[in-house]
Image: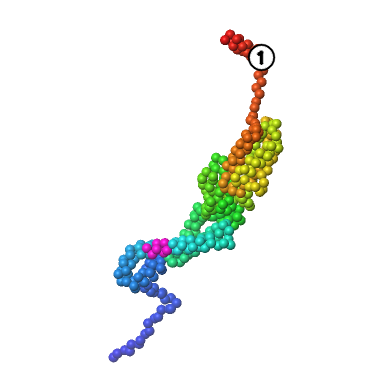
Amino acid sequence: MTLPIEATEEPTADPALAVPVPEATPSSKPTQPMEAAEGLKEAVSAKSKAAGSLVDTLDSWALNFGHVRFSLWDGIVSLGVILLVMLAAWAISRISGRLVRRASRLDDTQRLLTQKILTIVIWAGAFFVGIDLLGIDLTALAVFSGAFGLAIGFGLQKTFGNLIAGIILLMDKSIKPGDVISVTDAAGNEGFGQIRKIGIRAISVVTRDKTEYLIPNENLMINQVVNWSYSSRDVRVKAPVGVAYGSDLELVEKLLMQAAQDTPRVLTFPEPRILLIGFGESSVDFEIRFWIDDPEEGLSNIRSDVLKRVWRLFQDNGVEIPFPQRDLNLRTNKQFDRLIEALSTRELSQ
């Protein structure tokens, strides 16, 4: 006799209490930092098996930095991209500079300003193009770039200040290449120099003795500068002259005017002027005032030429240039009288 066996259902688990079983995931591989290197690798492998094998060998020599894999092939491609971008930026900058220099509607200052702005724009564009070609994710470097940028900002604060100062000087045309300014050296001696070049950091000023000063652009913004050719290249030079009392003043004025007119570089218009400026202790003081339009050729040398011409004309016409003279008065006393008497007796005995 057999007993019937009833089929019983297995208890089922509550879906709400079911614990999900994690699925097996393939092990994550380090990612390539450069899309350009990977794409170039595939293109080379498709063209030539030998070249592809060489590229695979170079790509096998790699270092892993966390989830980033950097191989020798990546380094070669990165270096090539950087050199290519820099060469392209340099070539475009040179071509744009030539085009700007040929622009006849712009003056020298506007050409220089345009060229500097174009250079900054070109190199900034080259930087971002290079970042894009290298496939660098800037968001991943946000923290590092922020700290690095802060350090660079403090370190290059003066450099960027001088760059902005140079652009401002070119925009307002207060300082431009070719201007003649006063230059003071470390010892406090003032000299005249001509601006040869306005660079990114400093301007180059060449003096008459061929000494070249590099003055930061920022110093010209905050310090007082004497620009002898700011609004006009005409510069007035003064040459003082003294003559003896008793001289014919009309003749003196005529000779001083002739000396100025006979000297090269002195402009005929505005005409030189001769002024009597005072009566000194031992001379009647005159001043020759004349104009030149080439201050870059020097001021002291033209003043010297005029004074040498004055010297020759005064000698030819008998005009005396005085020099200080002093009378010596000796007070008499007993010792002095005995000394004079002794000297007189000695002379008589001889």
Q: How many marks?
A: 1
Q: Position of residue 71 (x, y in %)?
A: 36, 64
Q: Quadrant of residue 165?
A: bottom right
Q: Which secondary structure, mark 1?
A: loop
Q: Is residue 79 magenta?
A: yes
The residue sitting at 58% across, 58% down in the picture is 107
Q: Position of residue 305 (x, y in %)?
A: 59, 41
Residue span colored magenta: 76-84
What is the image's colouring?
rainbow
Residue 36 appearing in the image: yes
**Closer to us: 53 or 256:** 256
**Closer to us: 286 or 42:** 286
The residue sitting at 67% across, 17% down in the picture is 331
| Dot 1 amino acid type | Asn
Q: Is residue 338 above or below residue 162?
A: above
Crowd around label 1: few <14 · some 14–19 · many ≥20 (10 Å): few
| Residue lying furthest left | 1
Main secondary structure of the magenta stretch: helix
Residue 70 appearing in the image: no
Q: Position of residue 9 (x, y in %)?
A: 38, 84
Per the image, the residue denoted by label 1 is 333
